[in-house]
Structure formats: C-alpha cells, structure tokens
Amino acid sequence: MTDEDQNFTVRADGPYIVRGGIPLVRKKQVMSEYGEPLDWQKESDLSTQDVYRLCRCGQSSNKPFCDGSHTKVEFDGTETADTGPISARRKTFESPKIFIEDDHSLCMHSGFCGNRITNIWKMREESNESAVLAQIIGMIERCPSGTLAYRLEPGGEVIEPDLPKEVVVIPDGPLWITGGIPVERSDGEPLETRNRVTLCRCGASAKKPLCDGSHKDIGFSDT
Ligand code: FES
C-alpha cells in the first residue's frame, strides 16, 4: 500500500468512500469552564476495513458509517466548494512577529482562534511577547479546517502543524481529514490537497463537501 492508494472520494448524493486503510478515530474538543475550546483529545480508534463508507447525509442509523439512508431521504449532496488553491483566497494579517494567513471561506466556527476576552487578530499586536506569540501559534495550529496558518517572516514558508494521516470523527460535527489526504469530488475533480480539511457529515452545509458550521445551526447529533 502506498500513499497514492490512500484517498477520500465523494459519491454523488451519497457517502464518502475512504480507501487505503486510513485510520478512523474519534477526537473531541477540550473545553474551558467558560465553553472555550482549548485543545483536542483522542477518545477512541474505530475499527474499519481497508475501504469504508462514511455517512454524508447525516441520516444514517450507523454513524459515522453509511447505511444507505441517503437513497431513502433523496439526499441532495451538490458539491459547490471552491477547488482552487488556498493561496488565491488567503489574506495576510501582519504583526511584529507573526504573519497570520487567513482563508475565511474555509471557516466552520470551531472557535479555537479566540476566547471570551480576545482573539488572534487582536493578540497579534502583542506578538513581541513570546508567551503571546506561543499562544497565537497554538490557537492557529488547533484550527481544524486549515482556515488559519502562519509565517514567521514576510515571504517565508507557511507553517502547518504536523498532523497524522487519519480521518477524525468530531462529535456532532464534521469529519476532520488530516495529514494531506487527497479528496476528490464526485465528478472526479480534486480539491486542493491540504494538511487540514473539514468535511460535512450532517448534510446541511452550503459548501459541500466542506463543512461550513451548519451542523450547529441544525443541532446535528451523531448519536
Ligand atoms: S458537519 Fe455539516 S456543516 Fe458541519
């Protein structure tokens, strides 16, 4: 098995097909007493075959796996997400010690970029302080969708966290694909391969196959 054999494909109005024995795990957000997301915690490994199918319509009785419900509910899985490069959409926020790269079209509101007091766009003005800089970097690296990344010098390399090649099931939320796994639309067109991608599994996103945060609006539950 080579890395080229590992991929994630979208089936038209149907599930995701995962090939190549990619590990499937559950991870949850660690929250503060005020409901602010602080970190990720692995909960469990899920047992799979080499090829497995994951629910995309949100209606399966065997989530995260597909049970064929998309046919019964006549799921409309029309894929409208931009397949172009993130570099064409990013905006750079400059500051003394860090250059924040932000593609807000990918945001699914996980909330790691702020807390009840401040956020990384305000904190960047104090990034001369190493403790603040470290906090900003940590918040950016925990962003699941890859909306946020950073450079430490102008024109320097965009720095991404080192993430394993795996599919993460987020409770009552999207699938989080990490480690640069190729994702292909149902018409065969690839999305740009990125280190962090969040894919809709509630069926309600307006930017399928990407998650846009709609799972919170509809109160999606995967139990
Ligand atoms: S899981 Fe569907 S919008 Fe997030």
Image (tube, rainbow, N blue to C red):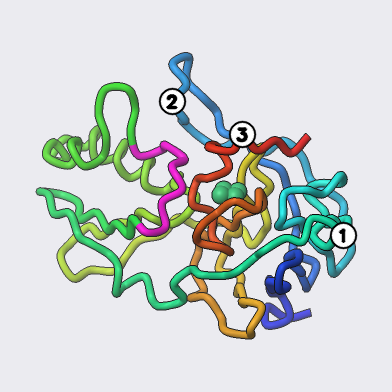
Q: Nearer the viewer, residue 157 or 52?
A: 52
On the rendered structure, is 61 left or right of 74? right
The image shows residue 18 at horizontal and vertical percentages of 75, 68
Give the mark, 3 or 2, whose residue is nearer the N terminus. Answer: 2
Quadrant (top left, top right, bottom left, bottom right) of the C terminus: top right
Mark 1 and mark 2 residues within 8 Å of each other at the beta carbon? no
- Tell me the amino acid under the disc marked 2: Glu
Give the mark, 1 or 2, whose residue is nearer the N terminus. Answer: 2
Sort mark 3 into few (<14), some (14-19) or many (20+) by Cα contacts within 10 Å.
few
Q: Which residues are magenta?
A: 105-113
Question: What residue is rendered at 38% in x and 76% in y?
Answer: 85
Q: Secondary structure at mark 3?
A: loop
Q: Which residue is mark 1?
A: 68
Camera-near label (3 vs 2) is 3
Q: Which residue is mark 2?
A: 36
Question: What residue is rendered at 58% in x and 64% in y?
Answer: 209
Quadrant (top left, top right, bottom left, bottom right) of the N terminus: bottom right
Q: Please, is residue 51 above or below residue 174 in the view?
A: below
Q: Please, is residue 193 above or below residue 76 in the view?
A: below
Q: Which residue is mark 3?
A: 219
Distance from Cα at disc 3 to Cα at disc 1: 22 Å
Question: What residue is rendered at 70% in x and 35% in y?
Answer: 221
Sort mark 1 into few (<14), some (14-19) or many (20+) by Cα contacts within 10 Å.
some
